[in-house]
Image: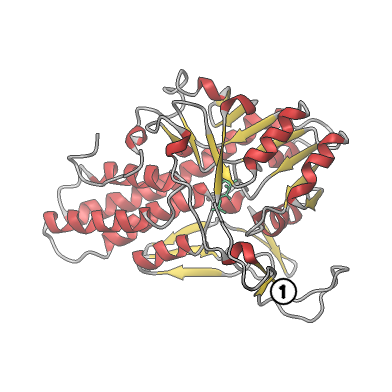
Amino acid sequence: MNVTLHGRTAHYRTVTFDSRRNALLLIDQRRLPHQFTIAAITDFRATADAIQQMVVRGAGAIGATAAYGLAQGARAFRGRDLEKFSRHVQTVFQTLQSARPTAVDPVNAMRAVCQAMRPGATVEEQQALALAAAEEFANNDVRHCQAIGRHGAKLIRRNSRVLTHCNAGWLAFVDVGSATAPLYAAQQAGRPFHVFCDETRPRCQGATLTAWELAQQNISHEIIADNAAGHLMQRGEIDLVIVGSDRALGRTGEVTNKIGTYTKAVLAARHGIPFYVALPFSTIDWTLRRGMDIPIEERSDGEVLGAWGVPGRLDGKPRRKTSESIYVRIANPTSPARNPGFDVTPPELITGIITPAGIVKPKDLWKERRRLGYGRGAETSGKNGTCTRANSG
Ligand code: MRU
């Protein structure tokens, strides 16, 4: 999407790859909205670390990062021995996969890369195929998000008031976003609407990232405290909810997304408000059979016990000119915390899933699986991906 900084507008992708330097180029999301910087990462272990530390985050963005990271690791191999190369690629795969457990996109993305490498007869050929496949994953991510926008735009009527949770915007993908794609498409169609961004504690991706994106695109929006949505729904001030997902089960229609999503789905059902989930095919897990089996990431308790920001004043005016973010402890110094990063929303609370192939009922994902990417290699993703032939399914 376009980013305007100091009066200059340029187009950026969240994740790109510099093949000359064998480097991932990532917009550093830990610094937004106060600083816009791009991190260059030249080693696959550092790439896994960037995913874990949330330099890059969001299902599609970490999917593309893992795909490029696998190519990056493969390209760093020196030698001609295919057996050794294959063991090395497997190590790269596992290192990247273990960076964050909940989103399935990294595993699906890396499996696509592994599959594309197989016809290569030499190490060099496989390295080239890996990079081409990673590029294809990234480009498909953009195309899929654009298609989500086309299908979802009709849900946004004139003057709709839309609630979204966390950041499923272009920063969470390579470009465009999933939950934000219908918003950007409706804006292009000239329809006015308003967005409420849940702040999304503990890391505040709604207050920092979604709000920054919408401000950059001149979309009318307000940040609300996570606890405010029920009140606004009760007063008739929210017409529609659109969220993203980190893993949706193709067999059951259960949807994992940022912690707090389930709460919003329950509230929406209580108030008869349509609740939609937007996702590309790479977010569908065709293997797991129960939401209870989805690995839910538990992150550090420091995220709950404190917050990041720049020094400011309650009236919003800057206190002093600094864009360097600092961490402040909010909670009682001797108290511990619990920090599950995601929750699972059952299909009966979801009005529809906005996919690149159209809007489907969550319970119909399995019935519609051929249209939704099943059978193209991703269906064997499950919990533990692998790059070896024997387990490729
Ligand atoms: O922990 P994060 O920021 O990587 O979580 C992912 C998310 O941003 C959300 O869960 C989002 O709504 C889905 S990702 C497209």
User: According to the image, label 1 marks what residue?
Assistant: 310
Viewport quadrant of the C terminus: top left
Indicate the position of residue 362 as horizontal and vertical percent values: 55, 25
Q: How is the image coloured?
A: secondary structure
Residue 284 rendering spot, x and y as whole percentages: 46, 35
Q: What residue lies at 59% left-to-right and 41% top-to-bottom?
A: 244
Is residue 273 visible in the rendered image? The answer is no
**Position of 208 compared to 52: left or right?**
right
Residue at left offset 60%, top offset 45%: 177
Give, as a three-letter code, the residue at label 1. Answer: Val
- How many marks overall? 1
In the rendered image, the residue lying farthest to the top is 367
Whole-percent x, y for residue 324 in the image: 66, 77
- The answer to whether residue 3 is visible is yes
Give the answer, above or below, for where 322 lies relative to 24. below
Q: Is residue 17 left or right of residue 4?
A: left
At a point 66% along the width and 72% down the height, the residue shown is: 329
Q: Is mark 1 within 8 Å of ligand 1?
A: no
Instruction: Please provide percent x and percent y for residue 46.
Output: 39, 68
Q: Residue furthest front?
A: 334
Q: Residue furthest bottom?
A: 320
Q: Classify mark 1: helix, strand or loop.
A: loop
- Closer to the camera in the image, 163 or 10: 163
Left or right relative to 75: residue 295: right
Instruction: Using the image as rendered, state which of residue 73 and residue 339 is in the foreground.
Output: 339
Q: Quadrant of residue 381?
A: top left
Residue found at x 45% / y 22%: 366
- The answer to which quarter of the image holds residue 325 is bottom right
> Badge 1 local density, few (<14 within 10 Å), some, or many (20+)?
some
Q: Is residue 238 above or below residue 97?
A: above
